[in-house]
Amino acid sequence: MTDDSAAATQANLKRVRTRHFQKAKDDGIRITGLTSYDQLSAGIFDRAGIDFLLVGDSAGNNVLGYDTTLPVTVDELIPLARAVAGAVSRAFVIADMPFGSYEAGPDEALRTAFRFMKETGAHAVKLEGGVRSAEQIGRVVSAGIPVMGHIGFTPQSEHGLGGHIIQGRGAAADALLADALAVQEAGAFAVVLEMVPSTVAARVTRELRIPTIGIGAGPHVDGQILVWTDFAGLSSGRIPRFVKRYADLDGVLTGAASAYIADVASGSYPAPEHEYEE
Ligand code: KIV
């Protein structure tokens, strides 16, 4: 199959499944992902043709008003994952397992994964950690639940890692590869590489059978994911270097809200066309 026809096949899928992640890697087709936490954004991204949506625990910073992802609970993510899963027809939906919901061991990981699969309609779960999370990944996968791994900078360990620091530099590259291999051997269908040097991400991508999904990992990976509020220009505060802003939703909404406030204050809204007749 030529690259063009493989890309067309990928674009025309009725429903993206784990086997399509692997096929995309094998065919050299780049996989696209965004986070989503609600029905409206999920529907828009699905219609645009995104391959997968992650109901990330980044909802902590983007929806729930926390400073980090650490306080996020399973109970908080479940309604968000249900809204996203219910809004898509093609995209593969992955629910993030939050901090404190799987680290205690494989049994805890499986209990949490069951909740997401039974209560939300998501198609897979994601959890952070390489070698340290391999047993958890193995147990969840052996129950028939697809798992996406997540290594490199893992936001749930930001205090342990000493802040938002690039991972896998210098001698740490070998440990990153060991993490990636552990995730693959445990049965994950794909792995997120967050904030690692491009050359190291390229090496991991070459060494792995399963696809790598980069976020701040450069272009030599099998796919990309961005946090949707970052890519759409809705997030405030520090925006990481790897983010490209594809829109200015903050500016659009600020302009709309200012215009509405001015119209209500002046009495020009509602106008006759907005009124009901008797
Ligand atoms: O929660 C999230 O948004 C994530 C991405 C950064 C991959 O885990």
Image (cartoon, rainbow, N blue to C red):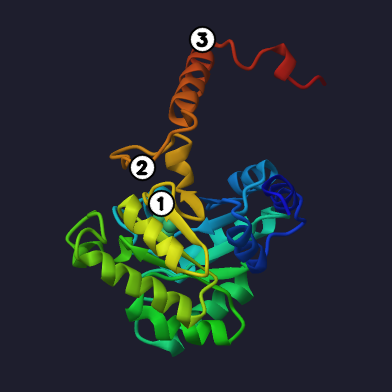
On the rendered structure, is 231 left or right of 61? Answer: right
Residue nearest the viewer, comparing 230 with 241: 241
Q: Residues within 10 Å of mark 2 (few under 14, many from 20)?
A: few
Decide if ligand 1 comes within 8 Å of the CB at mark 2.
no
Which residue in the rendered view is the most extreme toward the bottom?
107
Q: Secondary structure at mark 1?
A: strand
Q: Please, what is the three-letter code of the amino acid marked with disc 2?
A: Phe
Q: Secondary structure at mark 3?
A: helix
Quick check: marks 2 and 1 in contact, CB under 8 Å? yes
Q: Quick one: label 1 or label 3, which is nearer the N terminus?
A: 1
Decide if ligand 1 comes within 8 Å of the CB at mark 1.
yes
Which quarter is ligand 1 in?
bottom left
Q: Please, what is the three-letter code of the amino acid marked with disc 3?
A: Ser
Quadrant placement of the N terminus: bottom right
Instruction: Report how far apart the C-alphas of labels 2 and 3 lie in the structure.
Output: 43 Å
Mark sitting on residue 215: 1
Q: Residues within 10 Å of mark 1 (few under 14, many from 20)?
A: many
* Residue picked out by circle 3: 266
* Residue picked out by circle 2: 242
Residue nearest the viewer, comparing 240 with 78: 240
Q: Please, what is the three-letter code of the amino acid marked with disc 1?
A: Ile
User: Whole-percent x and y of residue 4?
Assistant: 70, 45
